[in-house]
Image (spheres, helix red, strand yellow):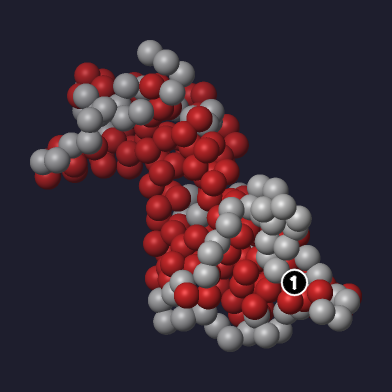
Amino acid sequence: MTPTDRFRSRKQPRQARSIETRQRVLDAAAHVFSTHGYAAGTTNRIAAAAEMSIGSLYQYFPNKDAILSALTDAHLDAGTALVAQRASAGLPAGLADTLRLFVRATIDNHRDNPALHRVLFEEAPRSPTLLARLREAEQRAVAVTAELLRTHPEMTAADPVLAARITVATIESLVHRLITAPVDAQQLEDAIVEMLAGYLARQTEQALPGQGEQDLLGAAGDGQAPGVQEVPNIRGIDDARTVQAIHHGL
């Protein structure tokens, strides 16, 4: 078995009963990992919690890393669906309200089971496939956020790409680190929004005339900022797709 193989599930089930059984394994694993942590979250414990034999569990997952990988994928997909649903009526007009939409959705996606989130993103090993997905998602989130900031009527940043990187990293880092701490979720949301709104307002105040409308890809040569994917004609992308791209990086 290669290092990558240990993170892969068995063949995806198609029959309703098999799909239900696989989900039962994932639900049991979420409980076991959040209660016991990664090291003590053994497949034997997961099988017992799922009320099945270890042999039955292995029909769906070869080991606990594959189970964790499936849980991580489900977490990321749920976050994307949540933020897209919140923005289905369109993004708010105000910059602070737009920031709040993303911050609140990120918090809500982590607050149901913060202990499991800590295991998924702090304790468990990450597969090369997951790392590549996270890197690509973050690049996409930065690119989309930079374009939103560059074109927002309240925003004039001398460097929208840098502002976007700070915005995405701030939401991601603070929510991931503090959601498991004894902190009030509303206070956390307010603090992050206030922090970012103040930072972006200062960027507008400090921007030199004409710099706020600089091209997102305005470097020499091919013009693409290092580590940021090109996002062509992003003004034509609807709000739901925009927030999905941003939230993939959070």
Image quadrant occupied by the N terminus = top left
Residue 143 at least partly seen? yes
Q: Is residue 225 left or right of residue 100?
A: right
The quadrant of the picture occupied by the C terminus is bottom right
Name the residue rendered at 69%, 56% in the picture. Answer: 223
What residue did someone put label 1 on?
214
Q: Residue furthest top?
A: 1
- Return the residue nearer the eye: 98 or 210: 210
Nearest the viewer among 170 and 189 is 170
Which image quarter: residue 158? bottom right
Q: In the depicted view, which residue is nearer to us: 234 or 39?
A: 234
- The residue positioned 73% from the left and 63% from the top of the image is 218
Mark 1 is surrounded, within 10 Å at the Cα level, by few (under 14), some (14 to 19) or many (20 or more) other residues, namely: some
Q: Is residue 166 in view?
A: no
The picture places residue 166, in percent across and down from the top left corner, at 73, 59
From this view, report whether residue 91 is shown above or below residue 111: below
Residue lying at 26% horizontally and 27% vertically, measured from the top left: 10
